[in-house]
Every structure is written in structure tokens, then in C-alpha cells.
Image (cartoon, helix red, strand yellow):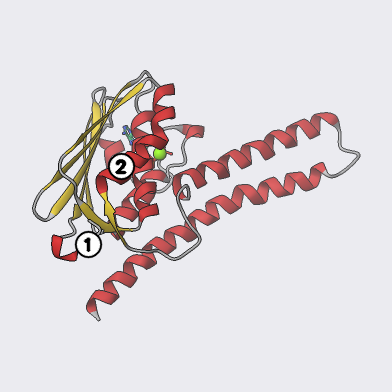
Amino acid sequence: LKRHLIKSKKLEAVEQMGAAISHEIRNPLTAAIGFVQLLQDDNIQKHKKKEYLEIVKNELISAEKVIQDYLTFSKPSLNSLEILNVKKELLHIIKILQPIANRNSVEIITQFSAIGFIEGDLHKFHQCFLNVMKNAIEAMPKGGILTVETEFSRYEVTVIIRDTGMGMNKEQLERLGEPYYSTKAQKGTGLGMMVVFSIVRAMKGSIQVNSEVGKGSAFLFTFPKVLPSYKNERF
Ligand code: ADP
Ligand code: MG
């Protein structure tokens, strides 16, 4: 009973975040609909039409960004726990991000130790590391190196995402994960790291961040390892 209670509390937190995020998507969509309705007027002046279309475009871009940070990998069904092959899933994210990395002159280096498994929701795991790696690339506007590393100990799996980017000062580090906290102005949502913290918490993991302004950052994620006795014969 105790275990169940803890689990449902965690699900609740994730669901609450879902409600907050859908609100963030609905607001710009509602605004866009309003301006489309104004545009349906046949007698609208040309300069007004241009202005409204610009607003509609910006509102849609804003909704799209929130979806990118939260729903890229979501699926319509309920949260499902699976046994995840950490190396395989990280390679999947790297493949998705490779074109963005290339465009930004970012080289991605991997350093995987032995194979390790953790328990979690596959789509949320993808969403989490997509957000962290996207931030790493965005922290290196002049290019650099993104390192994806794994370490396995007896009971834990650690994933380390390093960049050689701009780093964070004390305030930025403290505010990391705060909803709507972004230093990227129009280009950011400030929701990415909140999503990351929430997913990692739901997966019973923890996050440690080391950062130095002008040098780069390292995000360390530690998850409980799935022990061999729990493993499916497929592995
Ligand atoms: P967004 O990316 O939309 O700004 P996030 O929640 O993903 O929002 O990140 C919040 C803020 O944390 C960023 O705006 C940035 O200031 C800081 N940040 C996150 N990751 C890094 C990183 N790897 N290097 C430097 N700053 C980072
Ligand atoms: Mg981000």
C-alpha cells in the first residue's frame, strides 16, 4: 500500500505538469484563433491583415516551442514502465539531434561503459535527454563538443551530458528548472528543464549539475539500475 501511494503521488506531479503545459499551448492557440476570426472579415485593411498574420504566426511558433520541450515523444496511452537499454536509447536521441549539432558546429562524442538497464517510460526518457542535449547545443553558439557518457556501478546507472559552452553563473544554476526561467528571450520557453526534473523524479533518479561560466557544464543523472534478477530473458 505504501509503495502504491508513493507512486500515485509521483504520477500526480507529472499530470499536474501536463495540465500546466497544455495551458501554455492553449493560450497562444486561443490568441491565434481570435486573430484568424478577425482575418475572416472581407473588409479588413491590408496593413491590418499583415499585422494580424504576423501575430498568428508568432503565436503558433510559441505553441510549437512548448510542444517541442514537452511532447516531442509523447504518445496517447498512459505512462508505461519498461526496461530501458540506456546506451541504445541515448544513441537514438543523438541520431535525432545530429543534424542540429552539425548545423551548429557541435561534435558529439560518446563514451559508454558496459550495457546497463533502468526502469522508466521510454518516451519520457527520450524527452528528458532531448531537452538536456538541446540545451547543451544551444549553449555552444560558436560550436564545441557535446559528450555523452555512461557509468555503471553495482546499483546505479549514471548518464553524464557535458558541453564546452557558455556555462551558468550561480543565479542561473539556482534557477535551473524553475518554470519559465530562460535566458534565451524569444528563443526559449523556460519549460525544458522543468520537464527534465519532473521526469527524472518520476524515474526515481537524481540530477547534479556542475558548471563554469565560459567553460561549460556537466549534467549528471543517476538512476537506480535494474538488477539481473529483474531482467527479462531478452537481455
Ligand atoms: P530554455 O532552453 O527554453 O531557455 P530550459 O528550461 O531548457 O529553457 O533551460 C533554462 C535555462 O537554463 C536556459 O535558458 C539556460 O539559461 C540554462 N541552461 C540550461 N542548460 C544549459 C547549458 N547546458 N549551458 C548553459 N546554460 C544552460
Ligand atoms: Mg531548453
Q: Is residue 67 left or right of residue 149?
A: right
Q: Is residue 8 left or right of residue 233?
A: right
Q: Is residue 120 left or right of residue 157?
A: right
Query: Please, what secondary structure does the residue beneath circle 1 have?
Result: loop
Which residue type carries mark 1?
A: Glu
- The residue lying at 39 percent from left, 47 percent from top is 127
Q: Please, is residue 36 above or below residue 224 in the view? A: above
What label sits on residue 195 in the rendered view? none
What label sits on residue 90 in the rendered view? 2
Q: Which residue is mark 1?
A: 233
Which residue type carries mark 2?
A: Leu
Image quarter of the N terminus: bottom left
- Position in image of residue 18 (x %, y %): 46, 59
Q: Please, is residue 170 above or below residue 228 in the view? A: above
Give the mark nearer the N terminus: 2 vs 1: 2
Quarter of the rendered structure image containing ligand 2: top left
Residue at the far bottom in the pictured view: 1
Front residue of 159 and 62: 159
- Position in image of residue 172 (x %, y %): 31, 37
Q: Residues within 10 Å of mark 1 (few under 14, many from 20)?
A: few
Q: Alpha carbon of mark 2 to alpha carbon of mark 1: how far?
A: 22 Å
- Position in image of residue 224 (x %, y %): 18, 57
- The residue lying at 84 percent from left, 30 percent from top is 46
**From where the camera sits, is residue 178 visible?**
no
Whether the residues at callouts 2 and 1 have beta carbons within 8 Å, the answer is no
Q: Residues within 10 Å of mark 2 (few under 14, many from 20)?
A: many
Residue at the far left in the pictured view: 154
- Position in image of residue 169 (x %, y %): 27, 32
